[in-house]
Amino acid sequence: MKLNADLTQRAVVNSNHVEWVASPAPGVWRKPLERDGDEVARLTSIVRYDPGCAFPEHEHGGGEEFFVLEGTFEDEFGAYPAGTFVKNPVGTKHSPKSAEGCTILVKLRHMRAEDQAPVVIDTNKAEWRQGLVPGLKVMPLDSFETRHTALVKWAPETYFNMHRHMGGEEIFVLEGVFSDEYGDYPAGTWIRSPHASAHTPFSKPGCTILVRTGHLIDQ
């Protein structure tokens, strides 16, 4: 299956308008945003676990990152409340579940095999840093070579400079409304901007976004 699979093309999906699709595991549902492959695929999706449901043990052949949007996600290594960022490197495996139910944003099979540093960050407790312009705060989550993942918080009426995405950029809007010259993107919107694309972003009401950069050039 291919969905927004061409990484050289810009893609925008408002997940609020995407229907839930059943996964192979009962009570586990998906909203696909990007997919290249069948059940084993390079994939970006929102996944919902109904209370008490689980997914079979599986190995992360190309690595996994997820951000807990709601509820508490669990596996044999811990419990991860809303706001937790987790990176599971290539070759790791786990048996996910959720006693209370949860919703997570998941990205699969996009990592370099050399990137073997696991990451678990509760962003509710981590510190924000001052961004490059007034009104912008940044919380770094992960970096490997030219690839970077971070939360970025925009105060109302914050405007950023025009910049070019060398290696591409991927955004998921967690809160508020993110904007650029191409449109307005409310919470729940996923945006992929390809290598060497450019834009001038801003936020009039304020927003919080999850951002990945530099990872679209060599896939």
Image (cartoon, helix red, strand yellow):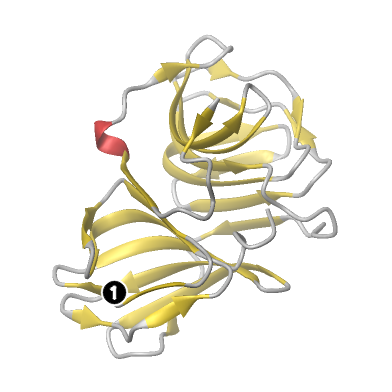
Q: Is residue 127 visible?
A: no
Q: Is residue 107 above or below residue 161?
A: above
| Relative horizontal placement of residue 55, taking residue 73 as reference (left or right) | right
* Residue type pointed to by label 1: Pro
What is the x, y in percent for residue 151?
Answer: 45, 66
Image check: 19 left or right of 7?
left
Q: Residue at x 74, y 23 (%)?
A: 57
- Report the residue at 79% width, 46% height from top: 90
Q: Nearer the viewer, residue 5 or 123?
A: 5
State which quadrant residue 19 falls in: top left
Q: Residue furthest top?
A: 26
Q: Residue at x 14, y 68 (%)?
A: 205
> Left or right of 208: which side holds 43?
right
**In the rendered image, the vertical position of residue 160 relative to residue 214, given as above or below:** below
Question: Looking at this view, is 130 or 2 the one in front?
Answer: 2
Percent x, y for residue 29? Answer: 45, 21
- Quarter-wise, where is residue 32 in the image? top left
At 23% from the left and 76% from the top, the residue drawn is 155
Q: Reply above or below: 130 against 11.
A: below
Q: Can I make out residue 169 in this image?
A: yes
Secondary element at tag 1: loop
Q: In this rendering, is residue 132 above or below 24?
A: below
The residue at which mark 1 appears reads as 201
